Amino acid sequence: MIALMLCLQDSLCKELWGYARAFRRQGVTLECLALGTPLNIDIRDLLGKLPARPEFILQPDSDFHFLPSGLVQQNIPTVCFHFDTYHSLRRRIRWSMLYDVPVVFHPNFADDYRRAGHPSVLTLAHAAQLDFYGGANLSPGERVYEVGWVGRLSGAPYDARRRLLPHLANQFRMNDWNRSYSIEETADIYRHSKIIVNISRDDYPQDANMRVYEAMAAGALLMTRTPTDLTALGFVDGEHFIGYRDETEIVPALRRFLADEAGRARITSAARGLVLAQHTYDARVKSLLEFIGENGSKLTAPARHWPESKVRLTYLDYYAGTSSMDCARKEFGWIARHSLVDSVAGARILARASARQGLNRMAAWSQRRRINDLGSDRTMAHNITLDQPK
């Protein structure tokens, strides 16, 4: 089975790296795009280079925002991944109309897509690497860190992390939370930690990101803020993780569970079993392939039935929303010649995008100054091959 992946091979990092490896284990060959491929390349040019007709076309969230022209005119199921569903939700819903199967990674958002008119939304949620975490569970004596942490610190949505982590490091034995780690190194940290404290984004604190699944799969006790998306996915506070509502609760709870080895073991055993059984990338890929098999051939993308000017306006909005302004202006040129109403809407989108670019440049300058004060940028390291990361 072949799938066309609308991203570069080098973009297969973090979640995409986990999915790519799981696809391969399920017998799916991913055909990625070559470096230098235009963001708005004609889909027919891509299909003509493949060894066979793909079973589906997948557009993930990645660092290059490809949206080939003519996508809705092909008789091939199309899928999009919206990893950060909560971010720019209205635009994501608008863009999803170009695809037969939009996949959202946070519970409770699928209904927003359905209410907007999309009939085939799939919720998957994040996951853990089975081969990294599925081996023998380490004993408490082998867990050298009382509290483990891996994650990004630079940027506006992480003020809580920058505030809390130095405080925790002063009171508990931790790994070096200042540095970045590869996916393999992260697994090693988590497997050698007794407790993992998840401090989510300031703008979406209930986020069940991939770290929470990895922490539970590693056999560490997960402590995360509540309310949390985990509860909508079958996880129970006190049974699979420990929740806190206020930051002042973190340190007392850590001390209590570090002293209660039996209670910690009870929770971590239940959580690890649930994650490894139902919340791995392999399980997610199986669910996705089953859903595509049942729904993909119906070709239910609403945009397949739209007039071309409306499709191109959605393309324009996507390019403008992802700062691909040359592509956006090209779409506007066609719209301006064919639809007065849509050209007015397109002009507004371009104006807002241009203004946002100016603000982003100012924000980037400010962030660079903050990073210089904090030290180096501590983003997660990328893994760009499908083999074990080195």
Image: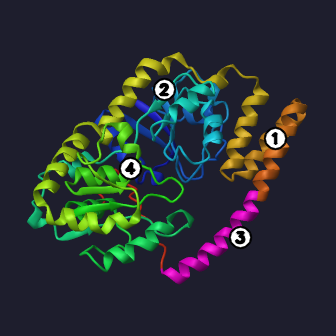
Q: Is residue 147 above or below residue 56?
A: below
**Residue 103 visible here:** yes
**Chain part drawn in magenta:** 356-375
Q: Residue beneath label 4, please? A: 17
Q: What's the residue type where badge 2 is placed?
A: Arg
In space, the residues marked 1 and 3 are separated at their CA atoms by 25 Å
The label nearer to you, 3 versus 2, is 3
Q: Residue beneath label 2, please? A: 53
Q: Main secondary structure of the magenta part?
A: helix
The label nearer to you, 2 versus 4, is 4
Q: Local crowd at mark 4 within 10 Å, few (<14), some, or many (≥20)? A: many
In space, the residues marked 2 and 4 are separated at their CA atoms by 23 Å
Question: In this view of the protein, which residue sits in the foreground, 27 or 127?
Answer: 127
Q: Earlier in the sequence, mark 2 or mark 1?
A: 2
In magenta stretch: residue 363? yes
Q: What's the residue type where badge 1 is placed?
A: Gly
In space, the residues marked 3 and 2 are separated at their CA atoms by 45 Å
Find numbered disc 3 in the image and state the secondary structure of the residue it sits on. Answer: helix
Q: Residue beneath label 1, please? A: 346
Pinpoint residue 81: horizontal percent, then vertical percent.
50, 39
Q: Local crowd at mark 1 within 10 Å, few (<14), some, or many (≥20)? A: many
Disc 1 to disc 3: CB gap under 8 Å: no
Q: Earlier in the sequence, mark 2 or mark 4?
A: 4
Q: Local crowd at mark 2 within 10 Å, few (<14), some, or many (≥20)? A: some
Q: Quadrant of residue 174?
A: bottom left
Question: From the viewer's perspective, is 230 left or right of 353?
Answer: left
Q: Local crowd at mark 3 within 10 Å, few (<14), some, or many (≥20)? A: few
